[in-house]
Amino acid sequence: MADLALELSKAAGDAGIKTVYGDPVTIEGTTLIPVALAYYGFGAGTAEGEASGSGSGGKGSGGGGGGLSIPIGAYVGKDGETHFEPNVISLLAVSIPFVWVAGNALAKLVKVLKK
């Protein structure tokens, strides 16, 4: 099991900055550095006996992981100036859950205030 944890830590360590900030690209004198929001999660576990699903009283183990990367924009550099240009479509998609929660909370607040 310790080997699994070491392998996961090696894989996750390589994915940090390389995933969030992409390689710079130069197009007609303008440099673009893509930026993304990225996160990862990993888990592992062991079980013994009938609870492991083996049915024969043996030992079981498992693990898994996953991640997500959302492009949020790019740093654009030209003529010595750098500014950030957001990816509006992905930022809108990321904000949908927040808008939904805020809308539901506002609707409940209005109902309470009407009473």
Image (spheres, grey):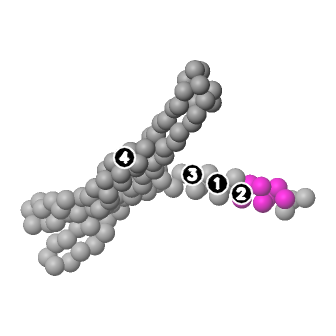
Distance in Å between CA atoms under marks 1 and 2: 6 Å
Please report contact status of discs 1 and 3: CB closer than 8 Å, yes or no. Answer: yes
Q: Is residue 13 left or right of residue 61?
A: left
User: Considering the image in quadrants, where does the N terminus appear?
Assistant: top left
Q: Are marks 3 and 2 in contact (CB under 8 Å)?
A: no
Q: Nearer the viewer, mark 4 or mark 3?
A: 4
Instruction: Name the residue carrying label 4.
Output: 3
Mark 2 secondary-structure assignment: helix
As drawn, the label of residue 105 is 2
Q: Which residues are magenta?
A: 106-112
Q: Which mark is residue 97?
A: 3
In 3D space, how far apart are the residues under numbered discs 1 and 4 (Cα atoms)? 41 Å
Residue type beneath disc 1 = Val
Q: Residue at x 74, y 54 (%)?
A: 107
Residue 73 in magenta stretch: no
Q: Amino acid at mark 3?
A: Pro
**Do labels 1 and 4 touch, CB within 8 Å?**
no
Q: CA distance from mark 4 to mark 3?
A: 38 Å
Q: Secondary structure at mark 3?
A: helix
Q: Residue at x 71, y 57 (%)?
A: 105
Q: Position of residue 16 (x, y in %)?
A: 32, 59
Is disc 4 placed on a helix, strand or loop?
A: helix
Whether residues under marks 1 and 2 lie with C-beta atoms below 8 angstroms apart, the answer is: yes
Tell me the chief SS of the magenta region. helix
Res. 84 image quadrant = bottom left
Residue 111 in the magenta stretch? The answer is yes
- Report which residue position mark 1 lands on: 101
Dot placed on the residue nearer the N-terminal end, 3 or 2 = 3
